[in-house]
Amino acid sequence: MLRRARTTKQLAQRIDLQYFTRPHALRRWRFWLSIVVPVFALLWFAAQRVEGGKKTYSSGPLAQAHAVFTQQCNLCHSQQPGAFFEHASDRACLACHDAPAHHANQTFTPACGACHVEHKGALRLASTADAACTQCHSDLKTREGRPHFANAVHSLAQHPEFSVLASGNTDPGHIRLNHYLHMQAGLVGPNNTRVQMQCDDCHRVSGTGVAANDAWPYAGMQTPASASPSPSQGLRQASFSMKSLMAPPEFSTNCSGCHTLQFDKRFGNEQVPHDKPEVVHAFLVKKFSEYIAAHPAALHEIEPPNRDIPERVRPIRVAHTVQEWTEFHVDDAEWLLWAKTCKQCHVIRPSANSLAEIAKANFTEHWFAHAVFDHTAHRMMTCTSCHTRAPESHEATDVLLPGVQTCQECHREPSKEAAEGRCFECHQYHDWSKAQRTKGHFEIPELAGGARANKP
């Protein structure tokens, strides 16, 4: 079959050159839209300007904490007529937030907006990117001397071992506690019952809540009102994120149900107060003085050896007066307490006077001095899944904290299948313990946009 040859001129004759001159509905709509839309946009900008709002200049929604400032850009940004594209000034941030320095010897101090990036939506401004931290900590330098911290940290995946574990520290608590023994089945508990102890029988988060208000299964005697404050009572008054820390054990709530403090069979199950040696001594003197006053015949009774009292070398004593009788029995009771009862848990030191010197229970409530940890966020896990060494620990000096590898099992790089693993999850840049009080500068209408705000 022969093909017809067509020239370019013949093909061009098929094109309708009058196409754009004929009316068409679609072209008319396109023409009017090209006029109406810009005019409407200009009118909208003008209306916003008349009302005094500045939301139209915003590059994105503010974080929830700052959402009330949406209509007042100049509260944070440098004031320039008709423009709000400048970075927020540190002076504006410090007007509301007295953010203390990170470290006095740091060589570089970033601007507030370099770490806390606004106009990204309803996120937490404290959720800073790792790059804000690693710009210094990937190669840490200080103004003088060597850094006291690891000088090359790039991410949690490359985080060095926690210093409290890497340095081989020991627990300075001065309490004799055998975790292995306490976790055995069939221990004799209160009222001669067999018990199986659990971790939360002694360890619970400080503060309030269901767990804090639950009854303690091994609570026995209550500390008298005159007793001295325990170490943990002072610690619980601190303001450092107490909801996240484990409260130190208390004798009255955690121990006294099993470890009783009887001192003499004459008084049955009555116990001495769990307090300083001088308080215990005064208690014993009072009790034995009252007893001999009510039973004067006891002065001449011949008492058999008390096998409950640990043996010691001493001369045979015969009481001739009420005072001697009281002194001898107070001495025996104290020897029973210091050499047997109290010694089970406390470190007893030699003392120059007749009273014992008991090492203070120096509980460490906050092990990570430069990090924060929230136990409540991990309550779905068993205690021993992180504190793996606790069930086998025989020495009270063992530091039973989990290592960084335990944390890395759940906390990894940003992923839908992993817990948050960025630096801010555990570390804070600002030392808020040194924060100063700030004074408010604004009225409600100024913040909400009902009045013009002319303050920086």
Image (spheres, rainbow, N blue to C red):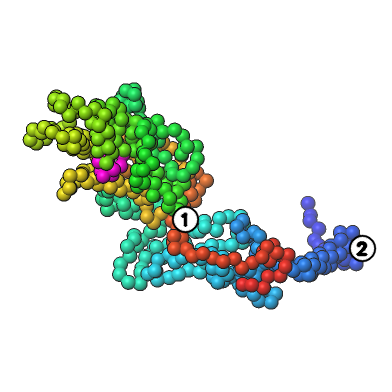
Q: Which residue is drawn at 37% across and 52% down?
A: 368
Percent from the top left, x then y, of residue 427?
Answer: 43, 56
What residue is rendered at 32% in x and 72% in y?
144
Residue at x 37%, y 69% (from the top left corner): 105
Mark 2: amino acid: Pro
Q: Find residue 177 and report its horizontal and vertical position in percent.
A: 27, 38
The stretch of residues the image draws in magenta is 274-281
Q: Which of marks 1 and 2 is nearer the N terminus?
A: 2
In the rendered image, which quarter contains the C terminus? bottom right
Q: Which amino acid does label 1 sit on?
A: Phe
- Residue 70 visible in the displayed image: no
Q: What is the chief secondary structure element of the magenta stretch?
A: helix
Residue 62: x percent and y percent? 63, 60
> Which label was assigned to residue 227?
none
Quadrant of the image occupied by residue 75: bottom right
Q: In this view, does 13 lie above or below 215?
A: below
Nearer mark to the viewer, of 1 and 2:
1
Identity of the residue furthest to the right in this view: 23
Point 40% across, 66% down: residue = 103
The foreground one among 127 and 26 is: 127
State the mark number for residue 23.
2
Residue in the foreground of this view, choosing between 349 and 9: 349
Q: Is mark 1 on a helix, strand or loop?
A: helix
The one nearer the camera, 426 or 309, is 309
Residue 242 visible in this rendered orientation of the protein: yes
